[in-house]
Amino acid sequence: MEIVLKDLEQKTKSILEAVKQELAGLRTNRPTPQLVEDIQVEYLGGMLKVKQLGSISILPPRDIQVSVWDKNAVLSVAKAIETSALKLNPSVSGNVVRIKMPPLTAERREEFIKVAKASAEKWRIKLRNLRDEANKKIVQALEAKTISEDQKFKSKEKIQETIDKINKEIDTALNNKIREITE
């Protein structure tokens, strides 16, 4: 049953990383490179991410700067950022695309908080599904008489502890993101 628990731990850790990465991509009043780095850009007949076409830096207090390596890609990067769901307005200067981040309105803050909560809930559902799969494997092992009744209860308890631990970490990440959004 150690295999089931190790597999569950590995999968829950990857879910936690995915949650953190998804929340990092949500806009707050503070600019971060994660906001624009994964925006898809059509370039030379293919789709590339902004981070593959240039380096992204932050210019305090609210500007993002993308230094595009190929001058032929500058307009494509600017257009992709402009047409993205972030509703940003980039300006081009040579090989540099600058994005001024306007302050968030109260309405937009509420929208982003809802998106963050929905994202966290989506990942919690995936966690519950993982827990159910692991519990089914434990029951199958009991029916196949490879584990005892005591081992079944201990394993189920460890599975629940693992899920609870990851859920707490998801809550912490969500609360941190909500705090950033409301700043």
Image (cartoon, rainbow, N blue to C red):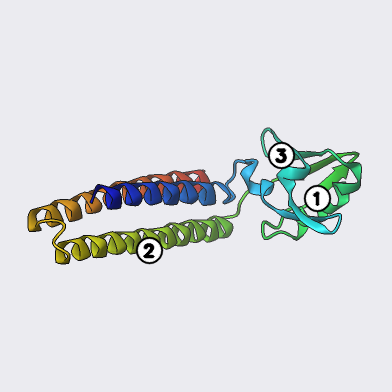
Could you say where residue 141 lies in the image, as x and y percent from the top left? 20, 61
Q: How many marks?
A: 3
- Name the mark on residue 143: none
Mark 2 burial class by Cα count in 10 Å: few <14, some 14-19, many 20+: few
- Name the mark on residue 125: 2
- The answer to whether one can see residue 20 in this image is yes
Of the residues under marks 1 and 3, which one precedes in the sequence?
A: 3
Amino acid type at circle 2 is Ile
Q: Residue at x 34, y 60 (%)?
A: 130
In-front residue for pair 159/117: 159
Disc number lying in front (1 or 3): 1
Estimate the spatial distance between the alpha carbons at disc 2 and disc 3, rounded to whole Å.
Answer: 36 Å
Amino acid type at circle 3 is Asp
Instruction: Provide the residue designation for mark 3.
Output: 63
- The answer to whether one can see residue 102 in this image is no
Could you say where residue 119 lies in the image, as x and y percent from the top left? 47, 59
Q: Residue at x 44, y 43 (%)?
A: 176
Amino acid type at circle 1 is Val
In-front residue for pair 130/115: 130
Mark 3 burial class by Cα count in 10 Å: few <14, some 14-19, many 20+: some
Instruction: Provide the residue designation for mark 1.
Output: 77
Estimate the spatial distance between the alpha carbons at disc 2 and disc 1, rounded to whole Å.
Answer: 35 Å
Of the residues under marks 2 and 1, which one precedes in the sequence?
A: 1
Could you say where residue 27 lies in the image, as x and y percent from the top left? 59, 50
